[in-house]
Image: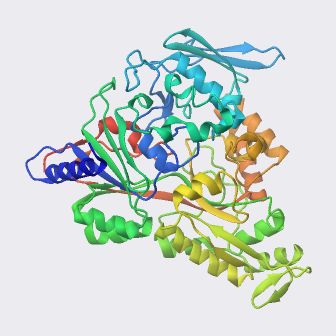
Amino acid sequence: MTRVTITVVAALLVALAAAPGLARDTLTIGITQFPATFHPNINSMLAKSYVLNMALRPITTYDQDWTLACLLCTTLPTIENGLAVPETLADGSTGVAVTYTIHPNATWGDGTPVSAQDVVFTWEVGRNEQSGFAGLEGYRRTLAIDVIDDKTFTVHGDRLSYTYNAMNGFYILPAHLERDAFAEPSEYRFRTRYDTDTTNPGLYFGPYRIVEVVSGSHVMLEANPTWWGPAPGFRRIVVRTIENTAALEANLLSGAIDYVAGELGFTIEQALSFERRKGGDFEVLFKPGLIYEHIDLNLDNPILADRRLRQALLYALDREQLSSQLFGGQQPVAHSNINPLDRIYSATVPVYDHDPDKAAALLDDAGWRQVRDGVRHNEAGEKLSLILMTTAGNKSRELVEQVLQSQWKKAGIEIVIRNEPARVYFGETMTKRANSGLSMYAWLSAPESLPLTTLRSDNIPNEANGWSGQNYPGYANPEMDRLIDAIEIELDPEARLPMWAELQRLYATDLPALPLFFRAEAYFFPKWLKGVRPSGHMVTTTTWVEEWHAIGD
């Protein structure tokens, strides 16, 4: 069947599904980004997670109640149930052995069982710095994996951490398909079948599998016949990319799409407007969550390497005004990287209220005293000019950029806006730290999420480590490394709180990134779509896509 024929058939199914009295077997979703890769462990991008969580599952995850739970495993290991056992390592420190059993009926889409051997292969790929895995740290800290039988394995960790039984970011790879691609590790990111043969059914074991990909346009998924869980409610799901949010609204109103993903859909200001005009036609939900909108600063840039300059950038901003004017106050100003909704939040962090005088004093102190044509210069005549980048076509971020540009101009700081499509921005620019200036985007986190890959100094992406890690600013502070390590091995939740407070204080003082605000997600559900439950944290609603179903009109 040709691609054109498939697309026509998909359109016909959508039209039939919308007809009154007929069962809906196709759901068409609109999102604003297209995945830069379909490999589950290379690159951190929400659009990819949104699609892949319908076709794959991590071993464990935090559920909608913020409780750690098994997805691929059968029983969550704990010290109490004996499936996690502290062990003394050769250097005298305390590690842990954690035993998991994969669901007995878990099978790749080509009929090959999902096995413990796949787990070992994934670990081998992940701990190789040339593989390009984003979350390298977790693989480094696994000392060994013992295969007990085809479905059971024991992970030996190099420390007993408070997250000892969480394998949330560990997406198993099919060794029988990916091993050849990994023959040359430095080429793996270009040879993986997730990108060269994306519709191969053997790559997936979730409720759905990917059957068609048209780059920049859409991804089509169909129910996976080898899925062992509850039968999904739709035979087919089409995820369409519509980068312009105004066009996204038009497509929803015309019926070209059924549903706009809350995770990657309407901006909050557009959602508020849409609710006033069309809210009665939908079930409306504004879900606050652990979504941290911020600006990374490339600390390799000598201008941004000066902490005084970074602090001046934040004092020069009126973020309260920005939130009020653009978002109706629905998105509160962030003072650190931790959301007040999270139990570990500390109210004692330094606060940078809008203070132009403090900003000016810090800029003067940093050597940017001369003002010519409204822009500050240093004694060498260098102009205080910085590039600001974000995802092109995102109306909300583009509005934020304009406000930031205007506010910084008043402080004598020139901002040059240079945006890119999300697949380029996240796939290349962020991964390779190619922007020497300011990069605006959001981190999504789980409850009490340790910033191992984003703030530890050994997680700075570079060519030597295959651009692994997510410390895009290039932040290196031994005290931050020490705090992260200390928090990780403290099992008492209450004893961790003062350490978390110190981490937030250090973050807010050093400012490797500029906190902007915490986002709320706007969900406009068609009244016939049920079962979609936002988590309020980094795990997308599609992780439980088998619960989604349609009811009669």
Q: In the image, is 17 to the left or to the right of 448? A: left
Q: Can residue 158 be seen from the camera position used here?
A: yes
Residue 199 position (above or below residue 377): above
Reply above or below: 380 against 16.
below
The percent position of residue 92, horizontal first and vertical second, equals 83, 16
User: Closest to the observer: 231 or 523?
Assistant: 231
Q: What residue lies at 66% left-to-right and 76% top-to-bottom?
A: 416
Task: Farthest residue to the front: give it.
Answer: 2
387 relative to 165 in the view: left or right? right
Color scheme of the displayed model: rainbow
Residue 263, position as x, y percentages in the image = 43, 53
View extreme (right): residue: 379
Whether residue 490 is visible to the viewer of this picture, yes or no, is no
Q: Position of residue 309 (x, y in %)?
A: 80, 69
- The answer to which image quadrant residue 162 occupies is top right
- List x then y, in percent, for residue 498: 73, 42
All told, the count of numbered labels is: 0
* Quarter placement of the N terminus: top left
The residue that appears at 62% across and 25% down in the rendered structure is 123
As drawn, the residue found furthest toward the bottom would be 373
List the single residue furthest toward the left.
21
